[in-house]
Amino acid sequence: MLIDHHTHTRLFSFDGRQTGGELLDAAVQSQLAGVCLTEHFEKDVSYVAGEEAVFNLDRYARAIRDLQAQGSRLGVRVLYGIELGYLPHLDALYGRLALRYPFDAIILSLHILDGEDPYSDQAIYLRGRRHVYGRYLEQLADMVDGCPDWDILGHFDYISRYAPWEHRKLTFAEQPDRFDHLLRRLAATGKTLEINTATVRVLRASGLSAAAAWPDPAILAHYRALGGERVCLSSDAHDAAGVGGLLPEGRDWLRAQGFAYLTHITNRQAVMTSI
Ligand SMILES: [Zn+2]
Ligand SMILES: [Zn+2]
């Protein structure tokens, strides 16, 4: 049973390029059991000039109910999620949102590092790989500890997607202490580690082989050694062509890494199903 745990539509995400209906049709095509809508909500961040990357949360709740009805007619489960873009001063606000709305799942993601956007601002990489990757992992660990109420760590390898280096895949061996700290906190708090296939697609496009583009197995092995069991699979699709992308392959890959379960989050509770 595969649930795509991270998807965007153009109704609420500034960069979404599909409607909710198109997302559901694509989920049927990909034979998914379900999709989780996780629209971008990033207080105090603007990717389009003059527009804060937020939306009306009440309108979103109503849209989800409509999509859930549509999904049940199509045999696709629709989970009510959100992708919160983290900044250190937003802990309290995001904690209140988590209490106010009946989300199934909250993804916490780091899209802005030390005030800069790793996607659009290449100057960030001038500080060097060791510094930038190290800072990103350090901020992720601070986020895990600082933000009070969420479920899934979004794309831990986001920083490697747009880095300028030829061999840009993030490896355990280059940041063992920071990975240890982050993964230890994740395992201890029972959060779920997302395997985000958008990063896999980007790394393949950068020249890595199909197998090598998956995350470094040493990262997953360390997480398991620390007692980390919860992993979910996400396409991070922004258009219909991406929905469910590489999920069957990801399931096989996770099995090969020794994971026996996939996790999905419903009603803020982790549900583990055999791979
Ligand atoms: Zn994201
Ligand atoms: Zn996303």
Image: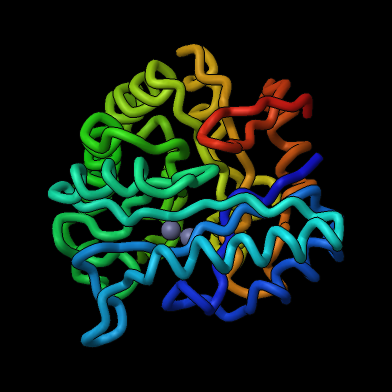
Quadrant position of the C terminus in the picture: top right
249 shown above or below 189: below
Left or right position of 4 against 184: right
Residue located at (26% from left, 66% from top): 117
Residue located at (36% from left, 47% from top): 100
Residue 229: x and y, percent?
A: 57, 20
Q: In front: 118, or 21?
A: 21
Figure quadrant of residue 104: top right
- Asked whether residue 207 appears in the rendered view, the answer is no
Residue located at (32% from left, 72% from top): 53
226 shown above or below 246: above
Left or right position of 34 against 115: right
Q: In front: 273, or 59?
A: 59
Colour theme: rainbow
165 shown above or below 96: below
Figure quadrant of residue 191: top left
* Residue situated furthest bottom in the rendering: 49
Quadrant position of the N terminus in the picture: top right
Residue 93: x and y, percent?
A: 22, 49
- Asked whether residue 136 appears in the rendered view, the answer is yes
Residue 89: x and y, percent?
A: 13, 49
Residue 29: x and y, percent?
A: 86, 65
